[in-house]
Image (cartoon, rainbow, N blue to C red):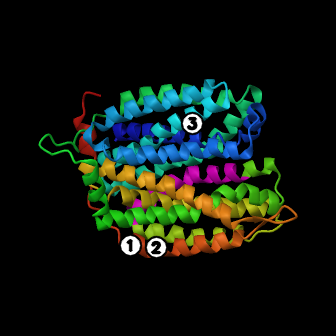
Amino acid sequence: MQQEKRLLWTLAAINFTHILDFMIIMPLGPQLMRIFEISPKEFGLLVSSYTFSAGLSSFMGAFFLDKYDRRTMLLWVFVGFLLGTLACAVAPNYGILLSSRIVAGLFGGLTSALVLAVVGDAIPDKRRGRAMGLVMAAFSVASVFGVPFGLFIASLSSWHAPFVFLAFLSLVILWMIARFVPSMKGHISSSQVKPTPIQVVKRVTGNPNQMRAISLTIMMMLGQFAIIPFLSPFMVANVGFTELQLTYIYMAGGAFTVFTSPWVGRLTDRYGKSRVFTVFMTLNIIPIAIITHLGNTPVYYVLLVSTLFFVTSNGRMVPAAALITGTAKPENRGSFLSFNSAVQQLSAGIASFIGGMILVENGDGTLLHFDLIGYGAIVLSLLCIPLMKRIRVVDAGEGMSILEADDQK
């Protein structure tokens, strides 16, 4: 059990650096636009370049991730991520920074699929919910600690500082991977004929259970990421928040989900993935309906509702991730999760684009039609519940045997 805990903490640390690397660029926008003399459109490209390159690499990863030892792949991919982050830290101009973000995204996208694949291989289904809760708490830690800390050191030094910090942290995590992640070759069969890329695609698209899992991912991302990117501008334009007060929303939401994410994981293992997902998805509808209809509102009330939004959004993700991971057998888990990660990134980008098309700026600076986005998110949320019930776990796993057998670590 001790070895399992060290493995999970290592995976959570990998997730933390990947998520923070993606998030930290957004609040640095004013500095970067001033220093590099770039437009909002060019800054938007800087942000989206990471997401789209991560989606591309996740798709390509489906063709080779299952051919190698999980530990070996994780080490090489994380080295690439480290180099991409280091390149961001020393970038002297916009063009090199943009190229560095693309490199970091390419390797960051692969880490997401590999982390879930390792959890699926190493942790049996009966404890997979708790494991996912711990690993996915990294998003909360990145929100409540990583982003404010990154902004703090950037204010003391320059925009380079957060990326220098991330590169140093990545070196430590690289040692943790080498030390605590065991060799995982159980999914590789020497007698097994390696599938071609077309066969990999057909294997996923021809599996109804896995396609339902991917459909669930698409619907969840469309519902949430039509809202999340526009929370900040909506809060400033319509609710009356200052830019400083915006940090309270993410710090409060992140602080609570740090504790609720592992708790939801334990509930998932105890009461079942579908039941816990249904409860949190239903509860998530309440803050969506309130947030998308807010006008000028006291800070304390907004923090209460926004925190409920983050807690319930995270709460539905934990059982969903545990279930989706179990829909693939070890020999093709990496391929499937790479597809799922690519779909996740693409869906988030499409949702943000659609949300931007629906929102309209009024003459007084307020944003119109956020309520329509809320209605759409609620409909998608309700449709996810019956779909979740139709997805089946095909690999319960004997995860601990993988860890116990690896005495060389």
Task: Give how far apart the Cα atoms at labels 3 and 1 are.
Answer: 38 Å
Image quadrant in which the C terminus is located:
top left
The earlier-in-sequence mark between 3 and 2 is: 3
Residue 79 placement (x, y as % from top left):
44, 28
Query: How many C-alpha atoms fall within 10 Å of the one at disc 2: few (<14), some, or many (≥20)?
Result: some
Relative depth, front residue between 205 and 198 = 198
Relative depth, front residue between 147 and 304 = 147
Label ID, residue 240: none
The residue under label 1 is 389
At a point 71% along the width and 53% down the height, the residue shown is 249
- CB under 8 Å between callouts 2 and 1? yes
Label ID, residue 385: 2
Residue 246 placement (x, y as % from top left):
75, 51
Residue 182 placement (x, y as % from top left):
30, 34
Identify the element where label 1 is drawn.
Answer: helix
Count of numbered circles in the view:
3
- CB under 8 Å between callouts 3 and 1? no
The residue under label 3 is 101
The stretch of residues the image draws in magenta is 249-273
Task: Give how far apart the Cα atoms at labels 3 and 2 are.
Answer: 36 Å
Q: Does 227 sit left or right of 403 as displayed? A: right
Kind of residue at disc 2: Ile
Q: Nearer the viewer, mark 3 or mark 1?
A: 3
At a point 25% along the width and 53% down the height, the residue shown is 199
Identify the element where label 3 is drawn.
Answer: helix
Kind of residue at disc 3: Arg
Q: Nearer the viewer, mark 3 or mark 2?
A: 3
Task: Give how far apart the Cα atoms at labels 2 and 1 are.
Answer: 7 Å
